[in-house]
Image (cartoon, helix red, strand yellow):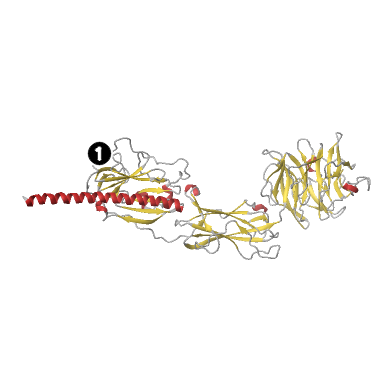
């Protein structure tokens, strides 16, 4: 009897030990899986790249497993760690799939978070096409902490993993259904990435057991971490890019030509996009390479970059880690970075700075090198009138290269400016008031003539203004001191030819002589100054001097001066430009149909015309290159509308 009683107690004790061990194994595994998922989420947030916690399925055949692995990367992720529990936790295992619910139902729709910029994340674009993860159960934590899966079902707006002391199921990874389970714990994952652990089979109707030990067999394991060779990065097409985007038509024809022209007061934005087929984070460095030009102080000065750089990541020279942008490459994603570079303050015109861009894997490999050459141009600015639909007629401004084209004085027309650009006269497009505008005091425009003003021209030193005034019976050519309260004086010159928009009044370089059309000829009139700066309109010849030898049928409509030479335009030979030094040495420079509104380069060399195509009402500005006795027009530097009256300042 004693032996029988001891035998019964021994059997009960052994069963209790097994049951306690089974329960402890499932509970321990549940704690470990919960913590590993939280760790993966924190890594995604800290490293700013997607990190996936994956449960292997033996090629999609089994929803029950005893292992996991973690992979991360912005694109083409790699397995960074894995763990197998085949001989641990007394046969406890993991199940992902559906079970019989006591209320509600399962949903196959993915759970998203409103407002997350990662809602467009696509698992199938993220993982390599050959990755086993495509057939495994993967929970991908994103840099904002949210989670996406590759088709895992959910209920109560959460995903679930069942940790049991043994379990059985029907189906493979897809269509998996729990048929039996031992002592169980449920890990729930919310769309925002929260991980919680609860006892039992959550919301189960009691048909699966969920107690004691439930025999099951799992023989496969998780894959080992990847050890693959680094692949050198590849810049995306069109990179590196420069902004503002240069117009190739305006670049010099030197060998090799520069990639962009900038002035010493500008900066250029340097943009790079690249992909890494090995999933490695990329590093970008911009450098100025030798020979470095000498600035105005005689020193080699490379200018300044917006980023000081990080030299600790394996690349020679200064640089920085690139940023991942999931929206590039049609949602596949790529690396990008933006820098700025400003030339030295005392950079000299014509100097060429060579910028070298290096893109490299952070952990080594060979850099991909691209070269960009930037040539420094004088900080010239062009003002012009443009009749555009939006924002409407006005005076616009742009760089000499045609970049940074923008509205400057809305509602004004017919600009003229001193060579340094510090004094501008123009006409109110509505009431034809003559206005003196000073860029240093832009809100204090001075009215010089109350109404009826047309085609003003300010002298080189800014002290006099010539313009046509509508007297009611016709146009009078007037000149006045460029100041508040000054009186305009009629210089008794003939009325301008038609069309009026092609007329241009011009001054000699010393500001003492005015050039203007006089019937079929180009004329001049000296205007010495009296006390107080008033122009003397009485002294000198009563009739203006004729400065050309054109035929009587030729009607001179515009003129400008370049270093003592006159550039004129006649409206007899289809508005073609000429260069003259008086009554002889005329140089015909036709470069196409109807060229008007000639404007000089304030530094000599090129000059500008308004091209008025016979078949096109829109008139664009072109720069004409003058070499010897020939001229050639470059492509248009304006972009839209009809453009008139160019003014070129230093």
Outermost residue on the front side: it is 2
Left or right, 424 with reference to 174: right
Q: Is residue 498 above or below residue 463?
A: above
Residue 385 shows up from this direction? yes
User: Which x, y percent locates residue 273?
Assistant: 53, 53
Q: How many marks?
A: 1
> Which one is in front, 69 or 585?
69
Element carrying mark 1 = loop
255 w.r.t. 464: above or below: below
Residue 416 % position (x, y): 78, 46
**Residue sitting at the far top:** 472
Residue 275 pos. (x, y %): 49, 55
List x then y, in percent, for residue 442: 73, 44
Task: Left or right? Give the position of 214 relative to 157.
Answer: left
Q: Residue at x 68, y 52 (%)?
A: 401
List the residue tagged with mark 1.
Answer: 206
């Amino acid at each position: 009897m004693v032996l029988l009683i001891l035998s019964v107690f021994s059997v009960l004790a052994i069963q209790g030990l097994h049951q306690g061990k089974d329960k402890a194994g499932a509970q321990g595994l549940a704690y470990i899986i919960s913590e590993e998922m939280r760790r993966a989420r924190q890594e995604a947030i800290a490293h700013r790249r997607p990190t996936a916690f994956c449960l292997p399925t033996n090629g999609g055949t089994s929803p029950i497993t005893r292992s996991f692995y973690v992979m991360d990367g912005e694109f083409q992720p790699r397995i960074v760690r894995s763990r197998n529990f085949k001989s641990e936790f007394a046969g406890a295992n993991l199940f992902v799939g559906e079970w019989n619910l006591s209320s509600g139902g399962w949903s196959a729709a993915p759970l998203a978070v409103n407002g997350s910029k990662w809602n467009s994340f696509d698992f199938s674009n993220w993982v390599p096409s050959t990755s086993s993860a495509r057939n495994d159960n993967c929970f991908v934590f994103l840099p904002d902490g949210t989670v996406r899966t590759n088709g895992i079902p959910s209920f109560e707006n959460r995903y679930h993993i069942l940790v049991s002391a043994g379990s059985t199921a029907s189906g493979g990874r897809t269509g998996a259904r729990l048929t039996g389970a031992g002592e169980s714990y449920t890990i729930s994952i919310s769309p925002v990435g929260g991980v919680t652990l609860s006892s039992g089979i959550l919301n189960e109707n009691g048909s699966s057991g969920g107690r004691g030990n439930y025999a099951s067999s799992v023989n496969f394991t998780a894959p080992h971490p990847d050890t693959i060779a680094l692949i050198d990065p590849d810049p995306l097409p069109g990179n590196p890019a420069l902004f503002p985007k240069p117009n190739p038509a305006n670049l010099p024809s030197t060998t090799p030509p520069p990639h962009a022209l900038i002035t010493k007061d500008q900066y250029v934005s340097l943009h790079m996009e690249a992909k890494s087929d090995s999933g490695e984070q990329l590093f970008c460095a911009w450098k100025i390479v030798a020979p470095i030009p000498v600035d105005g102080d005689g020193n080699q000065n490379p200018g300044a970059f917006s980023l000081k750089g990080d030299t600790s990541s394996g690349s020679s020279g200064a640089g920085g880690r690139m940023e991942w942008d999931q929206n590039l490459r049609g949602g596949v994603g790529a690396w990008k970075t933006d820098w700025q570079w400003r030339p030295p303050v005392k950079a000299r015109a014509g100097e060429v700075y060579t910028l070298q861009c290096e893109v490299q894997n952070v952990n080594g490999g060979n850099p991909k090198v691209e070269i960009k050459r930037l040539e420094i141009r004088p900080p010239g600015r062009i003002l012009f009138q443009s009749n555009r639909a939006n924002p409407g007629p006005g005076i616009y401004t742009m760089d000499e290269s045609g970049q940074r084209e923008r509205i400057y004085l809305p509602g004004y027309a017919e600009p003229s400016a001193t060579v340094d650009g510090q004094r501008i006269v123009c006409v109110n497009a509505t009431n034809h008031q003559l206005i003196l505008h000073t860029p240093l005091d832009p809100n204090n425009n001075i009215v010089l003539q109350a109404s009826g003003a047309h085609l003003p021209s300010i002298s080189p030193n800014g002290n006099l203004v010539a313009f046509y005034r509508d007297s009611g019976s016709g146009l009078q050519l007037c000149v006045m001191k460029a100041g508040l309260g000054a009186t305009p004086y009629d210089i008794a010159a003939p009325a301008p030819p038609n069309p009026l928009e092609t007329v241009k009044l011009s001054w000699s370089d010393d500001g003492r002589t005015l050039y203007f059309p006089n019937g079929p000829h180009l004329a001049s009139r000296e205007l010495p100054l009296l006390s107080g700066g008033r122009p003397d309109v009485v002294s000198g010849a009563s009739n203006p001097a004729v400065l050309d030898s054109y035929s009587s049928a030729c009607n001179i409509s515009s003129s400008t001066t370049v270093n003592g030479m006159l550039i004129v335009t006649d409206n007899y030979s289809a508005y073609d430009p000429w260069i003259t030094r008086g009554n002889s040495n005329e140089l015909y420079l036709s470069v196409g149909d109807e060229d008007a509104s000639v404007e000089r380069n304030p530094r000599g060399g090129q000059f500008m015309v308004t091209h008025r195509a016979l078949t096109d009402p829109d008139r664009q500005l072109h720069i004409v290159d003058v070499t010897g006795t020939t001229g050639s027009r470059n492509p248009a530097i304006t972009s839209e509308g009809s453009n008139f009256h160019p003014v070129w300042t230093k």
